[in-house]
Image (cartoon, grey):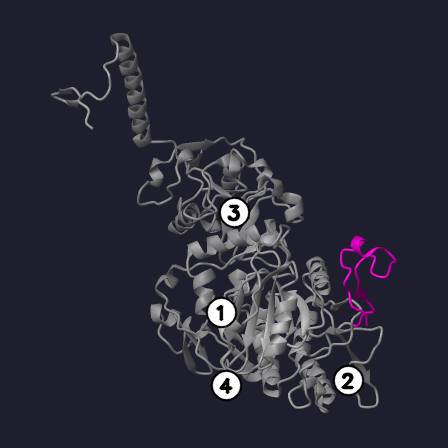
Amino acid sequence: MYTSGKYSSRGPALIPRMKTKHRIYYITLFSVVLLGLIATGMFQFWPHSIESTADWTLDKRSVHDAPLIRLPVSSPIPERGDLSCRMHTCFDVYRCGYNPKNRIKVYIYPLQRFVDELGVPISSTGLSREYNDLLSAISDSDFYTDDVTRACLFIPSIDVLNQNSLRIRETAQALAMLPRWDKGMNHLLFNMLPGGPPDYNTALDVPRDRALLAGGGFSTWTYRQGYDVSIPVYSPLSADVDLPERQPGPRHYFILSSQTAIHREYRAELERLKEENGEALLLLDKCSNLSQGAASARKRCYKGQVYDYPQILQARWFWEAYFSSMKAIGLTTLQIINDRIYPYAARTYEQWNNPPVVKWSSVNSPLFLPLIPPRAPGFTAVVLTYDRVESLFRVITEISKVPSLAKLLVVWNNQNKSPPEETLWPKISVPLKVVRTKENKLSNRFFPYDEIETEAVLAIDDDIIMLTSDELQFGYEVWREFPDRLVGYPGRLHLWDHEMGKWKYESEWTNEVSMVLTGAAFYHKYFNYLYTYKMPGDIKNWVDAHMNCEDIAMNFLVANITGKAPIKVTPRKKFKCPECTAIDGLSLDQTHMVERSECINKFASVFGTMPLKVVEHRADPVLYKDDFPEKLKSFPNIGSL
């Protein structure tokens, strides 16, 4: 079926012709809109005030284009600087507010040229390339905002990196003229050289009210703890430095000093430490037998031996992350301040100090808990198994009844036998994943597998079939209230044997508990990372070699990190294994108790202390022993002793 249409020289007449008065109206409206668009485009390319631009590259805009600001002699001068300032007294954190990314917003003041009444600049150098690089890096970062009303932190475009190039009084007056100065509240100044010879200062002399100072010369008298930020002094000579990767194997020295021209008292103290510690301290100084020049500036000597500097430092990752450029220094400073303002989302010790080999980004430390719910609710059950298939399937079936189970991960520790076919496994309503290990190690149960997406982990053996779904759900609920603890069912105790003069492992019935066995225990997955990558000494290898005590090692680790005792839940104490025999059951071996005691003494020696805490405490559900109808109890099916 076809339709006909009118055609003209301009094509088909698809739209009826409008009446003349309507056509004039729409033509007029279109003309107004077009003129508006043209005007908008013109203003886009017309020179804007620097207030609205985010471009901090000197190549695109000259400093000489910045507006000239004259400072009257009578301009106010800020106070010298409040040494009592702390984040809770001199910084308005409420200006930062809540945002989903937990990131502060930083505003950079527009570039201006400040001169006195006679037209003399307040700085002999103006805007240095180093300060321009710093501002450019910040303006290109996720911290930056060009909306002054959204800003949490303000950075002046007044360069105070080198105090020797400044006129102190006039620079202070220029700071006080900033529109949002407000006695320096929420303002950040960067200074690397607070003075020069012969009077080396330790902090910027420019009066700055309550402004934060990122400085490179602080002393214990001028640094305001938790408020100021101590930064490295950047050298342009470092631009072409190529540091080597750290070589494998043990370090030849524990401390290295490479600074030249140290004060004689400090040098004497280092010499004393050198005498006490021998080769553990390498004390370098300027080479006296080399001709002066650029080459000698990158050499250090000790007893006639010449070292390449800074290659001798062997700290490439730290150098590139925090020292190598003005960008690295500036963004690190902002991250430090960001961590103070959003402490629950702060970087961990590992993120600050470890090269990014380990995937720490997938886990939050329970020691610095977020104030918001975890992203992945529920828990992941990790079942370590070797060859007890029937018992394993019964454990899987029982755990699958727990409402908060999110995933079940089976760690298959038998390299000589394949796991059962997929069709033989129990059918459960949550994902079930089988991981095959390369070696039969007990520590495999504590590896930070990528499959563990929840923060809560239930470590459970393949023979623990007696725990009910109510007992497991209740244990998870207790862990949610104490996510930095080990929360488990089998309780154990360590005792001091006065006759033998050493620690003893005890499994008898007592009112005291200092350990919960990880054959059935909840914990935060953060501790998998610590166990795998940060376990002190040779404990991890010792456990794998002896095929025993991985649970005691985890108890030591958590107690040492948190300083807290574990939590035993529910009264159950008996844990039977229907398939265990004297041949394959570790806990039935006659030497088991002796080896467990040896473990405690070994671990205490490595840790250098006894971190385990003894408590007389057990968590039971409300109404557990009360004579109430079962339907009124949240956890009615709690087993007896």
1 or 2: mark nearer the eye: 2
Residue 259 tag number: 1
Looking at the rendered structure, the secondary structure element under dot 4 is loop
**What is the C-alpha distance between the residues marked 1 and 2?**
50 Å
> Identity of the amino acid at label 1?
Gln
> Identity of the amino acid at label 3?
Leu
Q: Which residues are magenta?
A: 614-641
Neighbor class of circle 3 (other Cα within 10 Å; few <14, some 14-19, many 20+) is: many
**Does 510 sit left or right of 407 as displayed?**
right
Neighbor class of circle 1 (other Cα within 10 Å; few <14, some 14-19, many 20+) is: few
**What is the C-alpha distance between the residues marked 4 and 2?**
36 Å
3 or 4: mark nearer the eye: 4
Which residue is drawn at the image coordinates 73% and 89% (left, top)? 594
User: Looking at the image, can residue 273 be seen?
Assistant: no
4 or 1: mark nearer the eye: 4
Q: Which residue is mark 3?
A: 189
- Nearer-N-terminus badge (1/2): 1
> Identity of the amino acid at label 4?
Asn
- Nearer-N-terminus badge (2/3): 3
> Identity of the amino acid at label 2?
Lys
| Residue 374 sits above or below residue 303 on the image | above
Looking at the rendered structure, the secondary structure element under dot 1 is loop
User: In this orientation, which residue lies closer to the viewer: 172 or 2?
Assistant: 2
| x then y, percent, for residue 453 | 55, 61
Q: Which residue is mark 2?
A: 504
Q: Is residue 632 magenta?
A: yes
Marks 4 and 1 close (CB-CB < 8 Å): no
Where on the picture, by quarter, is residue 512? bottom right
